Amino acid sequence: MKFECVFKEYLQEEKEGMLDKKCAHIEYSRLKEVLKSCQRCKQLNTSSDSDLNEHNLCRCQSCSLCDEKFFAELTKEASDIVGYFNSRVRHILHLHTATGMKSYVWRLRQCFKNDRQTLEKEGKNLIEYIAMNAIAMRKILKKYDKVRNPVNGENFKSRMLAEHIELLHSPWLIELGAFYLNFSGRDGCELDVFCGNFSCDLNITEAVMTMRLPDSIKLEYNLTCAICLDFVFNPYALGCGHIFCKSCACSAASVMIFQGLKAARPESKCPICREVGVYSKPMHMLELDLLIKKRCKNYWKERLYEERCDTLHQSKIYWNVHSTYSGLM
């Protein structure tokens, strides 16, 4: 069965389930029509100017008008998908990690309604949602490469990464995967809509989350901190998407652990990609930290002790310096 038919069936099945009116997706069929117009542009390259004007098509070999329309639509759809996905993930994680009265109310509701099963199902549906749309984007970009200039397609992929709208490179996906593994107690998630799975492997040598999709697509999310070269502990994702231990990220930004990442200077850069301003809105990955706590208890306890000692030591130095400075004043 062609992918277009599979994608349509998936959207139809999910329409009455997880997806709602605010849910965006790749307009696969419409984008194919845009590419067909590109093919017509090529066929009309030798036509007269009057014929070209009649069809409102450009005559140039690169077909900048069609390319602009194609990439503009694809960018908007990718941005909308990432926005919807992030908001839904944020919602279910907020319910799972709620504290105080919110936690009490949620647990009370479970006595009357199986919200736990509902959250687990929605987590799995969201993984399938982002994966299915990512496959649709890969398919349509492959079709573009056959019709147009492949260099433009590669430039578009690079731009998506730079703008943080690449569907399968979001820290929210890692956090959602950790949530599902914590919630279900399983080692992986089999994706029902196609042959694929989402799994996590934590062992002595490495910590990796893996997503396998059709067409031999394998994505690995490294859970090792690039600074201390150990499993991430109390992990935070910076605005660029790179994940570090909180203590390591604070050290890289020259701030105290107790001050937090938001205390970093605006010009502070990511230790990996060197992007500026990524400390302003850090994402605390509570589910990933919980996953490591459950799977690697001794390691987690050791790192917790080390971080508390470092925090206490830094706090003493900080207040000693400030008290000395105040005395001089």
Image: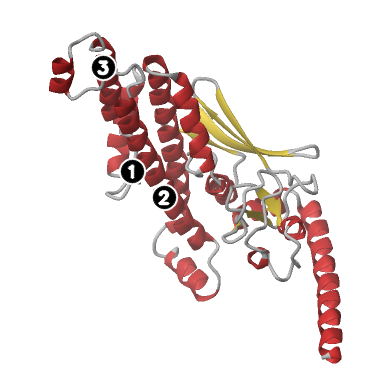
Q: Say which element carries label 3.
A: helix
Residue toward you, 311 or 214:
311
Query: Which comes before the other along the chain, label 1 or label 2?
Result: 1
How many residues crowd around disc 2 within 10 Å: few (fewer than 14), some, or many (20 or more)? some
Q: Which residue is under mark 3?
A: 41
The span from disc 1 to disc 2 (Cα, nearest Å) is 9 Å
**Residue that label 1 marks:** 24
Q: Position of residue 114 (x, y in %)?
A: 42, 57
**Does the rendering let one see residue 207?**
yes
Residue 61, disc = none
Residue farthest toward the top in the current orientation of the protein: 46
Q: Is residue 287 above or below residue 174?
A: below
Q: Secondary structure at mark 1?
A: loop
Q: Nearer the viewer, residue 139 or 285?
A: 139
Query: Is the Cβ of the residue at disc 1 closer than 8 Å to that at disc 3?
Result: no
- Of the residues shown, which amino acid type is indicated by label 2? Gly
User: Which tag, 3 or 2, sits closer to the chain's start?
Assistant: 3
- The residue beneath circle 2 is 83
Name the secondary structure under disc 2: helix
Report the amino acid beneath label 3. Answer: Cys
| Number of the front mark, 3 or 2 | 3
* First-in-chain label (1 vs 3): 1
Residue 3 vertical placement versus 220 (above, below): above
